[in-house]
Amino acid sequence: MTGPVWRRCEAPGRWQAVPVHHYKPEGTAPFRDVTRQLLFAHPELACEWRYFEIGPGGHTTLERHAHVHAVMILHGQGACLVGQDVRAVRSHDLVEIPAWTWHQFRATEATSLGFLCLVNAERDRPSLPTDDDMATLRRDPKVAAFIRC
Amino acid sequence: MTGPVWRRCEAPGRWQAVPVHHYKPEGTAPFRDVTRQLLFAHPELACEWRYFEIGPGGHTTLERHAHVHAVMILHGQGACLVGQDVRAVRSHDLVEIPAWTWHQFRATEATSLGFLCLVNAERDRPSLPTDDDMATLRRDPKVAAFIRC
């Protein structure tokens, strides 16, 4: 039987023995200034609890997939697109991203945005928008103004 | 298909449309000044993401169970017992509580303690300590000094 695991928070968005990874391999998808950390992935949980941090002016990949995201903003400020909604988000706000819904997170130009993201441990890979998808997304002016690719 | 769910944080430990519940039914287990909120429970996640808040001087139930807890302190200060360990905890510290391990959270006398707790959606019910369990736990002076029943 394994013992308890204690991981002290050493600085905002940094924990003892939790390595900071690249968000995705360079060149596989468009993103800017994002890191990824895996906080908990115990097999009994059936979920993975991750932390992502977007630097000022950065953004995650615009993508969709079958699996659901449960998100809590941990610190900083930014905005996110989920489906047709674009909303400002800040500390401790919650967002649930349904299956097959386009989504993208952005930090403000002045602040980073750190958020917790829960996913099922068994999940599909994200899909990127095709040119047709992009044309459809851009029909909505507020979506067109928000998205970064 | 359901749309995105947005739940703004309206005050520390309070979210739009997230009801605040009693921790447990009164009289079923010993605890003091604890509330429970269910932040996310989408069936596709396989997990439930909860928020618990302990008032100043309060404590959760001393218990153990087969299921694993993944915990992040969200705000406030306190301490927790996990197995033989008693440690002070504060904002954003992480704790993983293994199967069948005695655990209890306490807020300090001066501050509340709010924490996120992730569990598998399918899980067993907690067990409370028997008199024999209590005698065993109390053999360790630091555990004896910490626990509240």
Image (cartoon, coloured by chain):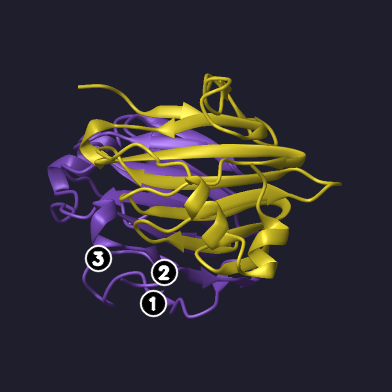
Chain colours: A yellow, B purple
Q: How many marks?
A: 3
**Horizontal side of residue A117 vs A21, given as left or right:** left
Tag 2: Cα neighbours inside 10 Å, few (<14), some, or many (≥20)? many
Query: Disc 1 or disc 3, which is closer to the eye?
Result: 1
**Horizontal side of residue A82 vs B133, given as left or right:** right
Contact check, label 1 and label 3, Cβ < 8 Å: no
Q: Which residue is mark 2?
A: B37
* Label 1 or label 3, whichever comes before in sequence order: 1
From where the camera sits, is residue B146 visible? Answer: no
Which amino acid, mark 3?
Answer: Ala
Location of residue A13 in the rendering, given as x and y in whole percent from the top left corner:
65, 35
Q: Mark 2 vs mark 1: same chain? A: yes
Q: Which residue is mark 3?
A: B29
User: Which label was assigned to residue B21?
Assistant: 1
State the SS at label 2. Answer: strand
Location of residue A59 in the rendering, given as x and y in whole percent from the top left corner:
67, 42
**Is B120 above or below relative to B40?**
above
Tag 3: Cα neighbours inside 10 Å, few (<14), some, or many (≥20)? some
* Label 2 or label 1, whichever comes before in sequence order: 1
Q: Nearer the viewer, residue A2 or A37?
A: A37
Contact check, label 2 and label 1, Cβ < 8 Å: yes
Which amino acid, mark 2?
Answer: Gln
Instruction: State how far apart marks 1 and 3 are (Cα).
Output: 16 Å
